[in-house]
Image (spheres, rainbow, N blue to C red):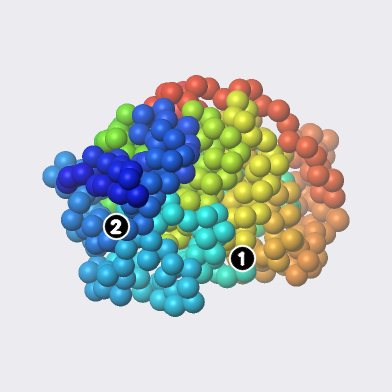
């Protein structure tokens, strides 16, 4: 990074030793930046830093790298892939001017789509630090990103869900019961994605095979994913497993990704392997990435940058591989990084804004740990705001309580709520399937069939299966169950939902 940045107001002068320091001091307050020792010491220092940042020319980020080009492959990716022609229409603007332009009618969805290749993560992180929550929502809502595999994700007026049927022992009957439960609430159009309790290639293959059999048996227009390490997925592909999507938790620095056990070359190899299978029917977006503020700090790989800027840099990695899905796991790592509901809400809106502006199909795991100063009411607020902002997908977990990963997130009921109050529908192919299977009675009102659809009645026949696959009364909305306190967030974290005994999220 280059030299010092200075801001003068009246008789007061504030010096920031480099661009990374300026960005960190301008960031809205969060506990992770204080933990790292980079956050503003006072509200006065934060405001002065924001004013200094507002006057900074956007093109500064093309000449003043936050992490040296020579030592970080993420920086090299950002710089080498920058499209100068796409950047030209806004190249004369300061960060503050860029904020005003984004909020104007000139920044239409079509214009923003053309601009994406010309924006760097640092530019969008910088402008987000100057924006109110409503600003983040308004601009994100204008960014339209569509991807496809067996269905089409991200169309306007749509909200998809990841059906997350985790089980603490990877019990197949338990996973199957959660899948059935979720499908009967209209969940699962983004992906049926399992975090494995036992993270190895053999178990990955077993889980993939089971979910693929469910998808094929009921002809469900969706995709499956086992959220194991990318190298496990590569090996599973080599062994003939039915892999739809390749998953990996990613970070915004080379050192973070090294701590996760992969490089950009590894992701490229995995993408090519998945593409070679040609399992998509309406598209071939084969990658799924999870991120989260605090992962670089947790891995001691943040290079003195604030956690939100590191998070935005992770989106450059994601964008390079043309993913079907990306989501920030916003509150999973704990209060040491995002202290309370206010900080979690702000971080979720920032992440969604930055990802959408860079051209990503951005979703969010709207979540918190039990030792955070947050509750399900905070998640309701963030869920509603993200729905208004055009979030691509959210999580669907039985009762909001992931009993394997021990954190609180959004439930099957929450997806119904968001779709109903905001007039949002599932992916179109999945919506048609829900009607054909008699799960939805009326998609305009997102009303469910009160009877068990005929296609699933056999799964519930017999006393043993009824015990294993019991479907609750979907007209009631139970309160989320309590979960044990989440393990210490000070362990190295891979940017996704990772149990302490597992090698991947």
- Is residue 379 shown left or right of residue 150? right
Q: Earlier in the sequence, mark 1 or mark 2?
A: 2
State the image coordinates of residue 35 (x, y, percent, origin top left). Answer: 41, 27
Residue 90 or residue 324, whichever sits in front? 90
- Is residue 276 shown left or right of residue 479? left
State the image coordinates of residue 246 (x, y, percent, origin top left). Answer: 41, 49
SS under mark 2 = loop
Tag on residue 56? 2
State the image coordinates of residue 193 (x, y, percent, origin top left). Answer: 54, 46
Tag on residue 158? 1
Counting other residues with Cα less than 10 Å from the Cα at mark 2, is it few (<14), some (14-19), or many (20 or more)?
Answer: some
Disc 1 versus disc 2: nearer the observer: 2
State the image coordinates of residue 399 (x, y, percent, origin top left). Answer: 72, 39
The picture quadrant where one finds residue 494 is top left
Counting other residues with Cα less than 10 Å from the Cα at mark 1, is it few (<14), some (14-19), or many (20 or more)?
Answer: many
Residue 432 or residue 486, whichever sits in front? 486
What residue is shown at x 30% (from left), y 43% (from top)?
13
Give me the C-alpha separation between circle 1 and circle 2: 37 Å
What residue is shown at x 44% (from left), y 54% (from top)?
130
The picture quadrant where one finds residue 96 is bottom left
- Is residue 171 shown left or right of residue 273? right
Height in image: 291 above or below 197?
Answer: below
């Amino acid at each position: 990074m280059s030299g010092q940045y200075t801001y003068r107001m009246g008789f007061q002068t504030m010096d920031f030793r480099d661009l990374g320091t300026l960005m960190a001091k301008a960031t809205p307050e969060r506990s992770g930046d204080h933990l790292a020792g980079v956050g503003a010491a006072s509200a006065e220092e934060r405001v002065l830093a924001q004013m200094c940042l507002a006057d900074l020319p956007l093109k500064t980020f093309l000449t003043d790298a936050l992490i040296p080009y020579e030592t970080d492959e993420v920086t090299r990716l950002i710089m080498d892939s920058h499209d100068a022609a796409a950047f030209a229409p806004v190249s004369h603007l300061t960060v503050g001017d860029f904020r005003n332009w984004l909020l104007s009618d000139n920044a239409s969805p079509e214009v923003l789509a053309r601009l994406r290749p010309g924006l760097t993560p640092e530019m969008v992180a910088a402008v987000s630090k100057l924006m109110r929550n409503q600003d983040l929502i308004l601009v994100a809502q204008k960014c339209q990103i569509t991807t496809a595999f067996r269905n089409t994700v991200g169309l306007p007026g749509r909200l998809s869900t990841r059906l997350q049927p985790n089980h603490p022992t990877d019990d197949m009957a338990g996973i199957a019961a959660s899948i059935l439960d979720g499908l009967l609430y209209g969940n699962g159009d983004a992906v049926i994605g399992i975090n494995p309790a036992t993270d190895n290639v053999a178990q990955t293959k077993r889980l993939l095979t089971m979910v693929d059999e469910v998808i094929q048996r009921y002809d469900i227009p969706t995709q499956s994913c086992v959220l194991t390490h990318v190298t496990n997925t590569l090996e599973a592909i080599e062994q003939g497993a039915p892999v739809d999507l390749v998953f990996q938790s990613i970070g915004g620095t080379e050192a973070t990704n090294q701590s996760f056990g992969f490089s950009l070359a590894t992701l490229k190899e995995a993408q090519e392997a998945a593409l070679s299978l040609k399992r998509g029917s309406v598209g071939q977006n084969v990658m799924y990435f999870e991120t989260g503020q605090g992962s670089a700090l947790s891995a001691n790989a943040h290079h003195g940058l604030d956690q939100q800027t590191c998070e935005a840099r992770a989106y450059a990695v994601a964008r390079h591989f043309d993913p079907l899905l990306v989501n920030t796991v916003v509150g999973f790592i704990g209060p040491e990084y995002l202290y309370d509901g206010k900080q979690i809400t702000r971080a979720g809106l920032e992440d969604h804004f930055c990802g959408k502006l860079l051209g990503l199909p951005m979703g969010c795991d709207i979540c918190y740990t039990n030792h955070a100063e947050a509750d399900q009411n905070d998640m309701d607020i963030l869920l509603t705001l993200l729905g208004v902002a055009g979030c691509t997908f959210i999580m669907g977990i039985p009762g909001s309580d992931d009993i394997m990963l021990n954190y609180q997130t959004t439930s099957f009921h929450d997806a119904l709520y968001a779709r109903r109050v905001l007039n949002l529908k599932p992916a179109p192919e999945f919506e048609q399937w829900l009607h054909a299977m008699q799960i939805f009675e009326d998609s305009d009102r997102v009303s469910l069939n009160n009877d068990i659809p005929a296609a699933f009645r056999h799964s519930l026949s017999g006393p043993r299966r009824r015990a294993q696959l019991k479907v609750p009364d979907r007209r009631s909305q139970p309160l989320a169950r309590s979960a044990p306190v989440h393990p210490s967030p000070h362990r190295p974290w891979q940017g996704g939902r990772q149990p302490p005994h597992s090698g991947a999220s």
